[in-house]
Image (spheres, helix red, strand yellow):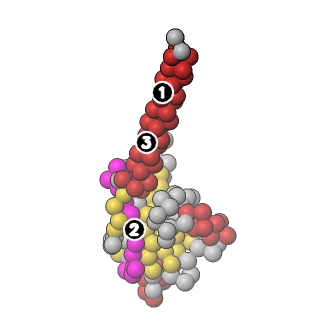
Amino acid sequence: MGCAGACGMTSGRLIAIAIVAITAVFAAVLWYAQTRAYFETLDQADLVVTLPSGDVVALAHDAFQGIDAASSPLRFRGCFLLEGEALALASGAMPHPDPTPLVAPDWFGCFDARAIGEALASGEAVAILSVHEIHRGIDRVIAVYPDGRGFAWHQLNGTLE
């Protein structure tokens, strides 16, 4: 007789705890899948630039750090340095009409999409077209600072609309 109220309350607590625990595990798995699971780090990448003539030319670079994922062509990000002729080549490349750096995972510290976007908007950096249609509907874009810092990412180019 004394168990009727107490047992029901214990069952309710267990169910509530189970729901919270399952939700926490699901959230942790989802966070891991979105920020870490599919990414691989890259020690090198072949970077090119597209010239106003339409020619595509290799871009020599140093200190490359990058990430990519087979799960989406939009997950590519890269950070690198340009010097001398490579910096001059990049400054003469085809400008990109609408650069929009995409956010990188927090653990990939060299790529700050907001800072790059602000530098592009202020004219501190310039955006150039690396490869048009590197994947269907996607361009590779490079932002270059006058001091030789370079950042690359993939973004939609509007051809799939």
* Magenta run includes residue 63: yes
Element at badge 2?
Answer: strand
Residue 133 lies in what quarter of the image? Answer: bottom left
Image coordinates of residue 140 in percent, x first then y, are 43, 61
From the viewer's perspective, is residue 132 above or below residue 7?
below
Residue that label 3 marks: 25
Element at badge 3?
Answer: helix
Amino acid type at image mark 1: Ile
Image coordinates of residue 6 in percent, x first then y, are 54, 21
The label shown at residue 66 is 2
Label 1 crowd bin: few (<14), some (14–19), many (20+), radius 10 Å: few
Disc 3 + disc 1, Cβ < 8 Å = no
Instruction: Specify which label sits upstream in the sequence, 3 or 2.
Output: 3
Amino acid type at image mark 2: Gly
- Residue 76 versus residue 110: which sits nearer the camera? 110
Q: Which residues are magenta?
A: 60-74
Question: Which label lies toward us, 3 or 2?
Answer: 3
Residue with the most extreme right position: 122
Label 3 crowd bin: few (<14), some (14–19), many (20+), radius 10 Å: few
Measured in 3D between alpha carbons, the distance from the residue under mark 3 to the one under mark 2, in whole angstroms, is 29 Å
Question: Which label lies toward us, 3 or 1?
Answer: 1
The label shown at residue 15 is 1
Residue 154 lies in what quarter of the image? Answer: bottom left
Element at badge 1?
Answer: helix
From the viewer's perspective, is residue 151 above or below residue 34?
below
- 42 left or right, relative to 157: left
Residue 19 appearing in the image: no
